Each structure stands twice: as structure tokens, then as C-alpha cells.
Amino acid sequence: MKHFKLFLLVIGILLSNSYSYTQSIPDWISYMNTPTAQRPSGCWANSTCAVTEALLHYYIGANIGIKLDEDFLACNGCMGCNAGCHSYYGEGMYYVRDNRLRSKQNINVYPNFDNAKWGLASATQIVSNIASIKTALQYSPVVSVIELPKDNSWASWNGLTIYEHSSSIMYIEDAVFGHVVVIVGYNDTDSCWIIRETRGSSWGNNGYGKVKYGSVWIDGAANFVGTVNSKFISKNSP
């Protein structure tokens, strides 16, 4: 009986941490590489690369480990190295669409990845509300701009609980600064988004966490999605 109770306890913990979706959407987490902490280049480049990699893997039909160069994106896709980016206008996604982005150099074991450029067929800002984001998740993870509150609750959040802020942040002057994450799914039972943070795999549940609908303006600010097609799968030389 003692062992049976322990078994039930373990099952309960696993279910409480489950990121099961309440609607039928692709398992975007399975198409993403292991989350890495953002480089000095910033959260926007980290999130843009994660979404593009997932879309490429989804189109190919398997996660074959394409890893894009987020530092190159940061230095060429906005205002210069380490300058940050006004992500409300989706510069990262638009750059990958218009210019393609090279693989991160000297790390890829799959043939020719180091001599490849990958791109998006489209990059689009969607209407920012819960219904539109849920619809978008049927074909793309969502690059989401959020506003971090001044109370430091986001920075101190370990990702193991569902994050909820007491009030929706409506204006940037009410926040410390903007931040960019990736929405990969949702769970209506918990009324939350499932997000990929930019703090690496040691944070949260292997780099992922849950955020209540409406918190930190996650479904009210700016959200971007992409698509790929066969034209952007070919490994073109840089």
C-alpha cells in the first residue's frame, strides 16, 4: 500500500506538470531545439530563431537539429550587435523572411548545415487576442512581446508555477521593459499559455513555463507568426 501511494503521488506530480494541449495543434516543443539562454544579442533574436527552427523542422517532418545563428541575426537584422531591437515591429521575423539566416557555424553534424541559409516564406503580425493566437498556433509558434512589471515578479519566477500578474499591463511606462518569448501552446483547463522562455533549459520545465491568459499583456501586445515552404528548405550557400 505504501508503494502504491508513492506511485500515485508521482503520477499526480507528472500530471500537474503536464503541458498537454486542450486543442489539437502541433506539438511545437518537439520541433524546437533544447532551449538555450539568450545571448547578449537579446530575447528577440533567441525567440525568432526558435520559431524559425521549429517551422523548418515541422515542414521537414522531423527535428533534424537545424540551429540558426542568433548572434548573426542580432548584428545584421536590427540596429547592430547588442543594440537590442524594437520587437513590436517584428524586425527579427522580417529579416529572416527577407534575407534568410545562416546556420550557427561549426556545430552542425548534418551534411552542409554550416554552408546553409534558411528562411521564412512569410512573417506576419497577427491580431493580438486569445482567439487569434489559438488559431495561429495551428500553423506556427508565436513570437510574443510582453511587458514586464516593475515588481520584479517575472525575473524572480522560476517557471515551476503558473505565472499570473494581478493586473494587465497596458502601457510601457507601467513596465520595466519589454521582453520576447515564444507561445507554443495553451491549456484552457488552467487558462494559460505555454511559453518558451529565453533563460535556457535549466529554467522552468526544461525551459518552458505557463502564463495565465492576460498576464503581462501576453495576448494584447504584439504577436508574430511565420510559414515556410519548399523554396526555403534548400540549403543555399551564404
Image: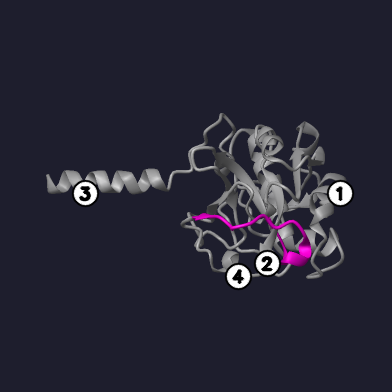
Decide: is 15 above or below 180. above
- Which of pointers 3 and 2 indicates the residue nearer the eye? 3
- Which of pointers 3 and 1 indicates the residue nearer the eye? 3
Q: Name the residue under label 1.
A: 99
Q: Mark 4 points at which residue?
A: 152
Residue contact at pointers 4 and 3, CB within 8 angstroms: no
On the picture, is 119 further left or further right than 156? Answer: right
Report how far apart the C-alphas of labels 1 and 2 lie in the structure. 21 Å
- Residue type at mark 4 is Asn
Image quarter in which the N terminus is found: top left
Mark 3 crowd level (few <14, some 14–19, many ≥20, 10 Å Cα): few
Residue 203 image offset from top left, x and y in percent: 51, 61
Report how far apart the C-alphas of labels 3 and 2 lie in the structure. 41 Å
Could you say which quadrant of the image residue 228 lies in? top right
Can residue 177 be seen in the rendering of this structure? yes
Element carrying mark 3? helix
Question: What's the mark number on residue 39?
Answer: 2
- Residue type at mark 1 is Asn
Report how far apart the C-alphas of labels 4 and 3 lie in the structure. 36 Å
Identify the magenta region.
162-180
- Residue type at mark 3 is Leu
